[in-house]
Amino acid sequence: MHNAAYAEGLKPTQWEALRYIARANHFSRNPGALTSYLGTTKGTVSQTLHALERKQLIEKHASKNDRRGVQLELTAEGRKLLERDPLLTVERTLERQPRSERQSVEDGLQTLLHALLEERSGKPFGICKNCTHFKREGGGEEEWPHFCQLLQVPLSREDSDDNCIEQETPRKNRH
Amino acid sequence: MHNAAYAEGLKPTQWEALRYIARANHFSRNPGALTSYLGTTKGTVSQTLHALERKQLIEKHASKNDRRGVQLELTAEGRKLLERDPLLTVERTLERQPRSERQSVEDGLQTLLHALLEERSGKPFGICKNCTHFKREGGGEEEWPHFCQLLQVPLSREDSDDNCIEQETPRKNRH
DNA sequence: TCATTTAGTATCGAGTCAAAACTAATGCAA
DNA sequence: TTGCATTAGTTTTGACTCGATACTAAATGA
């Protein structure tokens, strides 16, 4: 898999960053959140983003609230390249397995991931709307129907379906 | 896991190479076989081995039969470092799972590995003594009890238990 | 108001990656 | 036996990752 991740002239980390941006909600679409997701350093991420920018796969915009902040967005080209993501092969292979077998692999890997994260004191990312801070229909407006009680901001439908760096789920099976 | 593989001042590839050398039988303990295992290029492997040599974790010896060849061996230090292999964490985590769950993860990943190898036209490596060319008790001598019918050479007990680049198993479940 | 914190960039040295050019030994064939 | 192709491995180059360190500029807070 490491090997496959050198496809299309990108490096493994560049693929990871591209995937991240595609799936992160807009609070999480910045260099800082990506740094925490990748578990690396700000400097490295800055360079990776610079490389992706040169390849015209992403764009950097100024953040609205914070003039230091950078908002990351995929370009059309970036979105298109993700259709040839080498990781899709894994997905397709898994989909060819019988449902029960696939399920047990997924469960096993999920457990492994959480154990590894705990040991490395990393933070799991998760879908916004599964979060303890998510308040359905708490936003009021049509375009921003939901609400985040942690950040105290209304949420769009898209934000709710994407990954968030602040996501917190009540964890079962902790030991 | 990618992240964890930067432990102990080594890079992911250096760990892979170290592990490989530790588990390969002596026909396979050379730069060429490692290149094929890693699915990369000779040049890259040459540099990685050079780095490991500088760190005194491996040694290069002249090959007996072929004066171009290089025989790779772990140093005592290299062997010792492998006891702190970051991948051992994964092993230990898996061992904490119930047997049935662990088994299904292993089966799933095995399937995934073969599918991926096939797609990338890579060659699976395997244990020498499970090979179609392996002839038990075909060597005659005490120190070299077994025999490889492909390479036409006697095999030591250690060689038989290790991975071989030439390994071929009669595959079930091919589709 | 001024010091601290936070968000991100720039630069450094070690190392990976593929590609290409290289050396030296081995095989093979006329 | 010569001579050429093949094979094993090294070296170099340019783009890039990685952590560490030093930096800039904006935000925060006492």
Image (tube, coloured by chain):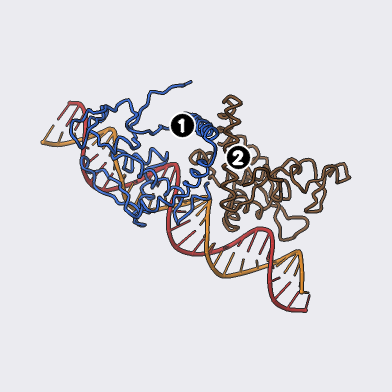
Chain colours: A brown, B blue, C red, D orange
Three-letter residue code for mark 2: Gln
Mark 2 — residue? Answer: A110
Q: Residue at x 86, y 45 (%)?
A: A138
Q: Assign a secondary structure to mark 2.
A: helix
Three-letter residue code for mark 1: Leu
Residue B108 in the image: state x and y as whole percent.
Answer: 53, 31
Vertical relation: B86 (above or below) D24: above
Residue B101: name its quadrant. top right
Q: Residue at x 29, y 28 (%)?
A: B134
Position of A164 compared to A175: left or right? right
Q: Which mark is residue B163?
A: none
Mark 1 — residue? Answer: B117
Within 10 Å of disc 1 (Cα), the crowding (few <14, some 14-19, many 20+) is some
Residue A79 in the image: state x and y as whole percent.
Answer: 66, 39
Front-lying residue, A105 or A53: A105
Q: Residue at x 28, y 50 (%)?
A: B60
